[in-house]
Amino acid sequence: MRSGERIQHPELGDGTVEFVISRGGKAGAQVDFGYMSAWISREELGFREQHDRLPGPISSPSETAATEIHLPTLSNDVVEARRAILALKLGQILEENVLDLSIGTDDIRTSLERAVGGVARRRPASILFKGSWGSGKTHLLTMLNKLAADGDLATASVILDGEGVRFSEPMGLMETLLGSLRYPGEAVPRGISEPVVSLRRKFTYKYEVERRLGWRIANAIFQVPMRCLDEPDTIDVLEDYFRMTLPATHANAKLRRLGNRGIALPPLKAWRVAERPNRFCNLLKGWAELCALTGAKGLAVAFDEVDVEYASTISNGHRRWLRRNLLKAFRTILKKNVPLLLAFGSAPASDVDDENDAVIDLVRSVGRMDLEIEVPQPDLEQTRELGQRIIGLYAKAYPDRMSNVDVQKLKLLIDRFAEHHQRGLNPAPRNFVRGALERLDVAPGLESYIKIG
């Protein structure tokens, strides 16, 4: 098992080994599954260490060094369904399942499709999803990403945490945004260097794209000679540079060591605090335009958990001031003819002033949103329908586990849980989904712990 190796996990699906590392005395690796990254032990992956093998004849060195793999064979449909179930348990939803598990959102979907179509025609848009915790803001943002990808827009998703990723630090925010950038048809981000190289091959002169990309990005792209576009080491440096994880001075030094002495990449980050909001928006405009020139029709960016950002700055006036500067810069870029969509997901606050209420302050700072969507709460019938669709997804994920269960009784159980859920003080859809999955996890023992009839 080594870095870059492709493996298959019986529950999580296909993944790529990022690096091998031991934890708690156990050998294992950090594995990227596309939708999540997790540490997995060798035993869980089916690998067996040499000292675990049964005594037997002495093997040849080549046989001793070989790694034995014993993994169950799962169909792609089962693996994908299990990925979907795991995401739901974590409070997320995969784009592949979001439309199937959307109940009572037909009008919202129509509005979002209209906004996506407008962006493809170079009409920028802003959308605010508002609702309490667990009401479905992330679900609708995922739906937007799905519709945007189907409408040939590139997408990027940022989850604000109020600490490492926040509006008050635009340069770090841009780094996170670029790390999540995906073109239509991509399950995981392929990196920044590929579209950059594509644009460099497509256009001969900087002035052909400078007006759309801005001086900084255009100048950086055309600093790279054509002869370097097939050099893997050079491309790796450019990937880190354009994703802003490598400063321009370090990138230039590495390129010189690789023999590219004529390249002088300009700094992408703004070090002065006052310059950062405008630099962020100039770069965002440039990347939206670059997407439109290299295989997409524009860029849709989703900012989730905005209320977490606001909650973290209630007692920090300086960070509130920095955040407002960036949000006001958003207002400027949305007035331009840019193929860009900005979406925000936030819960309204209570017992705070307007400045610390994300829903109110977003509209005041960014300006009037093109769409303000109150996340709809499903009624009893819609909750029941959602429960039945979850049962169908679960049956695809674990067909053997469900083979001994009376499906009609199971549906009745989930229906009754839906009734109980709707009578609760906070009937959030996320709580219902998690509760339904907990009941399905014990479905094989259903007859022994509950009577239905």
Image (cartoon, rainbow, N blue to C red):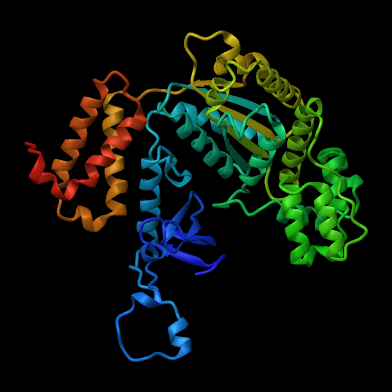
Viewer-closest of 260 and 292: 260
Q: Residue at x 59, y 25 (%)?
A: 127
Hey, which residue is sitting farthest front in the picture?
A: 25
Quarter placement of the C terminus: top left
Vertical comparison of 13 with 87: above or below: below
Q: Residue at x 85, y 41 (%)?
A: 216
Whole-percent x, y for residue 397 in the image:
31, 53
Q: Is residue 25 left or right of residue 444?
A: right
Residue 354, image quadrant: top right
Whole-percent x, y for residue 208 in the image:
88, 46
| Residue 122 visible in the picture | no
Count of labels shown?
0
Q: Residue at x 81, y 52 (%)?
A: 250
Q: Residue at x 28, y 46 (%)?
A: 392
Whole-percent x, y for residue 444 in the image:
16, 50
Vertical comparison of 349 with 88: above or below: above
Whole-percent x, y for residue 347 in the image:
49, 21
Q: Is residue 120 left or right of residue 67?
A: right
| Residue 242 visible in the picture | yes
